[in-house]
Image (cartoon, rainbow, N blue to C red):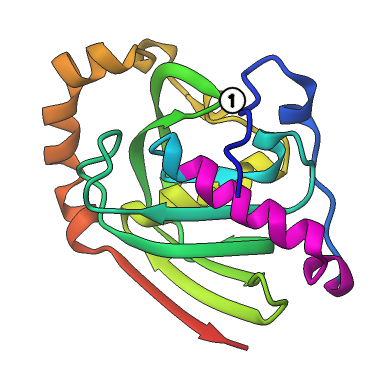
Amino acid sequence: MAILKIAQIGHPVLRQPARELTLDEIKSESIQRLVDDMIETMRDANGAGIAANQVFQPVRICVVEVRGNNPRYPYKPEIPLTVLINPIIVPSGTEMFSNYEGCLSVPNIRGVVKRATQITLTYRDRTGKPFSAVVEGISAGTFQHECDHLDGKLFIDKVEDAGTLCSWENFDKFYKNAFVTAISEMVERNRLRVEEI
């Protein structure tokens, strides 16, 4: 495994919609190696997820994982390592919540994005098996953020109020406590149910 370079805002690859992979491609050695390297890169950078185009590969793969000791997101509930290939997200209902987000490709910036509180997610895992998942709570925002990358979108595109943009240091100093209090219900409602289809 290798730690890959992460594309930074302004690089064209981050605005390029990623292409779907065939089953044969999914099972190829090169894609399996890419998945391993993405996991290693995400963990090394303390990310909650990473998309393939963030590591200069515009294919529809993202990986998501939140561990309890993540210093960037200590308030997020744990998410087991999930590899999503060719994911499709459909919001369930109209309920939204305000999520303070950051991104490995937009260093040292956070901002508030409206996210669906519950989503249905279909995808293939790294072996090509199809899965369906219902994700609710703040974890739903994490999956939406990563899948946006595959469409060439960054979280800053969805920030409705530019006044919420701030550095990580200022988020911690001025906004984190209020945000964690505001999302406590979302954390309690957090749910991830996955089944093979």
State the SS at label 1: helix
In the rendered view, tell whether residue 160 sits above or below residue 131.
above
Q: Is residue 101 magenta?
A: no
Q: Position of residue 143 (x, y in %)?
A: 49, 53
Region in magenta = 23-42
Residue beneath the point at 63% across and 72% down: 125
- Along the horizontal axis of the image, is 141 left or right of 183? right
Q: Is residue 31 magenta?
A: yes
Q: Is residue 91 visible?
A: no
Residue beneath the point at 72% across and 35% down: 152
Image quadrant of residue 123? bottom right
In the rendered view, tell whether residue 91 sits above or below residue 46.
below
Residue beneath the point at 34% across and 12% down: 167
- Along the horizontal axis of the image, is 104 left or right of 55? left
Closer to the camera, 26 or 148? Answer: 26
Q: Position of residue 129 (x, y in %)?
A: 68, 82
The residue identified by callout 1 is 157
Q: Position of residue 109 (x, y in %)?
A: 41, 17
Q: Position of residue 139 (x, y in %)?
A: 37, 55
Q: Is residue 45 visible?
A: yes
Residue beneath the point at 47% across and 18% down: 107
Image quadrant of residue 117? bottom left
Image quadrant of residue 65? bottom left
- Along the horizontal axis of the image, is 167 left or right of 135? left
- Where, quadrant-wise, is the C terminus in this rendering? bottom right
- Along the horizontal axis of the image, is 53 left or right of 93? right
Q: Main secondary structure of the magenta part?
A: helix
The amino acid on which the numbered mark 1 sits, given as a three-letter code, is Asp
Task: Sort mark 1 into few (<14), some (14-19) or many (20+) by Cα contacts within 10 Å.
Answer: few
Q: How many marks?
A: 1
In the rendered view, tell whether residue 134 sits above or below residue 108.
below
